[in-house]
Amino acid sequence: MLGNVVVKAIILLMSLTHGEAAAAAANDIAIVQTAVPGYAKWGRLAMEETAKAYSGASIIDYKYEGRSERGQGMAEEKFRLWLRESDREFGVRVTITVEIATDTSRGVRFEELTH
């Protein structure tokens, strides 16, 4: 909410000083704001929960692997995270179970990957 207010204030200031260029920039900002992927909420949760479960490791990369329906109003969001801990690098698949009707998490599972 506050972020939108700040963006609008910047656009207003730009329009007062730069006219048409500000209108073009406002258009670009609107496009960027709508381009947030639907899985972003679950990606943040996957990273937060992984950081808790592997507190000694750093997350160095992640990839969204997709969503699958499980039936009974449930779905799974899957992510592959790459972690570094001391001299060791390893992958972890994070599976988040989501209740579709309420768009809420019902559990997070971790699976360390061997390759």
Image (cartoon, grey):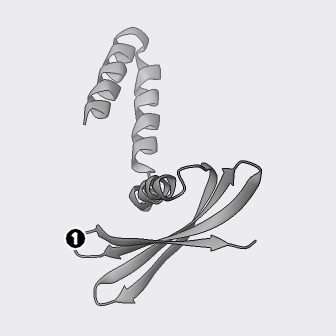
Q: Position of residue 109 (x, y in %)?
A: 46, 73
Q: Nearer the viewer, residue 24 or 44?
A: 44
Q: Which quadrant is home to the C terminus?
A: bottom right
The structure residue drawn at horizontal position 42% and vertical position 22%, both measured from the top left corner, is 22
Q: Nearer the viewer, residue 22 or 84?
A: 84
Q: Which quadrant is home to the N terminus?
A: top left
Q: Position of residue 29 (x, y in %)?
A: 43, 35
Q: Position of residue 8 (x, y in %)?
A: 30, 26
Amino acid type, callout 1? Thr
The structure residue drawn at horizontal position 39% and vertical position 87%, both measured from the top left corner, is 70
SS assignment at label 1? loop
The structure residue drawn at horizontal position 58% and vertical position 49%, both measured from the top left corner, is 56
In this view, the residue farthest toward the top is 17
Q: Is residue 49 above or below residue 9?
A: below
In this view, the residue farthest toward the left is 102
Q: Nearer the viewer, residue 31 or 49?
A: 49
* Residue named by callout 1: 102
**Image quadrant where residue 16 sits:** top left
Label 1: how many residues lie within 10 Å, few (<14), some (14-19) or many (20+)?
Answer: few
The structure residue drawn at horizontal position 40% and vertical position 26%, both measured from the top left corner, is 23
**Image quadrant where residue 42 sits:** bottom left
